[in-house]
């Protein structure tokens, strides 16, 4: 009787582990899908010629000496230059960039409002 109970327990433990492994794979594939969607959104925003930046947008510099610098849009000047505050602790100065050197940056876990 103990042997039967032990065998049942073994099967149940393996079945439970298999279910957890399936959940882990589902979570990993969902995570990969979310990352792929973020990359797709970033590329679409970068490829678009009519990207509109507003104060509070998170952006990334795509070309020039400060390539890969991330920051937050402070304002957009009338001449089309975008003024950002870099996401660096010790750097407090605002920097102006042409809109063509910037791309909107989306991080996983952040809320994004999409409007048509």
Image (cartoon, grey):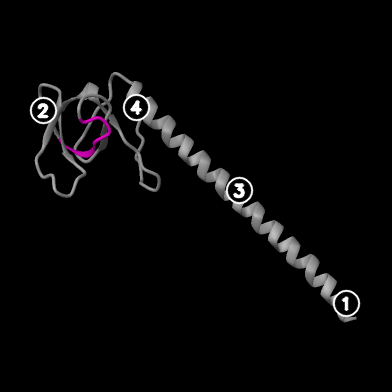
Q: Quadrant of residue 45?
A: top left
Q: Position of residue 83 (x, y in %)?
A: 14, 33
Residue sitting at x 20%, y 27%: 65
Residue positioned most to the right = 1
The segment highlighted magenta reads 66-74
Residues marked 4 and 3 touching at CB (< 8 Å): no
Instruction: Tell me the CA gap for discs 4 and 3.
Output: 28 Å
Label 3, residues with CA under 10 Å away: few <14, some 14-19, many ≥20: few
Instruction: Say which mark, if any, is on residue 116.
Output: none
The spot of residue 51 in percent (x, y) is 28, 25
Q: Secondary structure at mark 4?
A: helix
Around disc 2, counting alpha carbons within 10 Å, would you say few (fewer than 14), some (14 to 19), or many (20 or more)?
few
Distance between mark 2 and mark 3 Cα atoms:
46 Å
Of the image marks 1 and 4, the number of the one nearer the N terminus? 1
- Label 2 vs 1, first from the N-terminus: 1
Pointer 1: what residue?
3
Label whose residue precedes the other's in the sequence (4 or 2): 4
Q: What residue is pinned by disc 3?
A: 26
Q: Is residue 42 magenta?
A: no
The residue to which callout 2 is attached is: 77
Q: What residue is pinned by disc 4? A: 45
Q: Earlier in the sequence, mark 4 or mark 3?
A: 3
Earlier in the chain: of badge 3 and badge 1, it is 1
């Amino acid at each position: 009787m103990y042997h039967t109970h032990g065998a049942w327990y073994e099967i149940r433990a393996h079945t439970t582990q298999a279910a957890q492994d399936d959940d882990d794979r589902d979570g990993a594939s969902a995570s990969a899908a979310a990352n792929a969607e973020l990359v797709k959104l970033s590329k679409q925003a970068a490829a678009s010629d009519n990207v509109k930046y507003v104060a509070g947008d998170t952006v990334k510099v795509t070309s020039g000496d400060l390539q890969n610098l991330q920051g937050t849009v402070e304002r957009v000047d009338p001449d089309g230059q975008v003024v950002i505050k870099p996401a660096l602790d010790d750097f407090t100065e605002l920097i102006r960039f042409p809109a063509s050197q910037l791309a909107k940056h989306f991080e996983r876990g952040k809320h994004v409002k999409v409007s048509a």
